[in-house]
Amino acid sequence: MNVKAFTYRDDRGNYYIGVEWDGKRYNFSLLWEYYKQFAAKGKGPTLQFLQVMIELGFFELDTFKEVVETVSSFRSLNDLELRGSERIDLPVSRPQKVLCLGRNYKAHAEEWGATVPEEPIIFAKLASALTPHNSPIRLPDWPGSVEHEIELAVIVGKAGRVHSEEEAWEYVAGYTIANDVTARDLQLADFKKCWPWLRSKSFDTFGPLGPVVVPRQVFPEPPELNMTLRVNGEVRQQANTREMVFGIPRILVEISKFATLTPGDVILTGTPAGTGPLQPGDVVEAEIEGIGVLFNSVVAG
Ligand code: MG
């Protein structure tokens, strides 16, 4: 059973959690309220944002299953179905950190004339760069070439430090799709000067993320998912997440050597070969098997 969850805004501007269940999309925030009435006399938190659901430790495949199945056992779900006018928001609205992996696919390292690193290369992207599904990527006029990078994003579900790869999976809430948009000329120029490459990764809108989060329990561990990035319908990047140099458990252990993981943190696991330039007017579709398609247009300014 695949379950996809998302935060959305309705046409009155109210935020809710949505769930895709058996091919249909429902208002999960309202399902949760019915479930609370049934199971806990109305007691319990309100859930309007995935970030909060993740922070409270409710983001599990079993939670969605229990809520949907319980409520559908005593009432029809027809009036809770979404009509398609909802606007998908960021899957996590305020992550404490967005960390990224450099050169984590062999073919991508080689297209840069570089080798695969001996240890994971970890760098940060500002959370203010994140932008939701269906929103534009804005290209400023000064930093030169800007490129796309499709990546599997891990959403952290548990606070703490991961000491061994064996315990790593329990820190994963789920998975979504990221585009680690990069001002490539600026990145290379900064790199030559031994400057950090933070700004080339962190322009506003250089972090498309979403549209949905799939709970970790849906996929095998490690997830082996086909990923494809298309620009104007043309395939630019194609790979499988099994080709990562350092897998998700190792990445979480390495991050934990310097930082405590916090629910809602976003970890971009690296991009495969085929990164290339974006132009105003382009339409970018980043697709990962079992998760969906992250759609963003490209505009100037
Ligand atoms: Mg990247």
Image: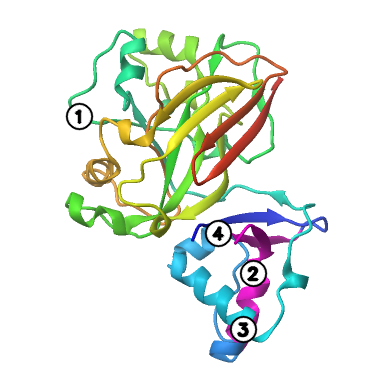
Chain-order first, disc 4 or disc 3? 4
Element type where label 1 sits in the image: loop
Q: Which residue is mark 2?
A: 29
Question: Do labels 4 and 3 touch, CB within 8 Å?
Answer: no
* Of callouts 3 and 1, the N-terminal one: 3
Q: Are marks 3 and 1 in contact (CB under 8 Å)?
A: no
Which is in the foreground here, disc 3 or disc 2?
3
Residue 198: % across, % down: 43, 25
Query: Which label was assigned to residue 73?
Result: 3
Span colored in magenta:
14-37
**Does the residue tagged 3 have its C-beta within 8 Å of any atom of ligand 1?**
no
Question: In the image shown, does 119 or 274 lie closer to the viewer?
Answer: 274
* Residue that mark 4 sits on: 50
Distance from the alpha carbon under mark 2 to that under mark 1: 42 Å
Nearer to us of marks 4 and 3 is 3
Which residue is at a point 29% across and 46% down the rendered structure image? Answer: 259
The kind of residue on which mark 1 rests is Glu
Residue topped by disc 1: 119
The kind of residue tagged 4 is Leu
Image: 298 above or below 56? above
Q: Which of pointers 1 and 4 lies earlier in the amino acid sequence?
A: 4
Q: What's the distance in space between the residues labelled 3 and 1, CA to CA? A: 51 Å
Rounded to the nearest angstrom, the CA distance separating label 1 from label 4 is 32 Å
In the rendered image, the quadrant that contains the C terminus is top right
Work out whether mark 3 precedes mark 2 in sequence or the reverse, and give the earlier one: 2
* Mark 4 in CB contact with mark 2 (< 8 angstroms): no
Real-space Cα separation, disc 3 to disc 2, in angstroms: 17 Å
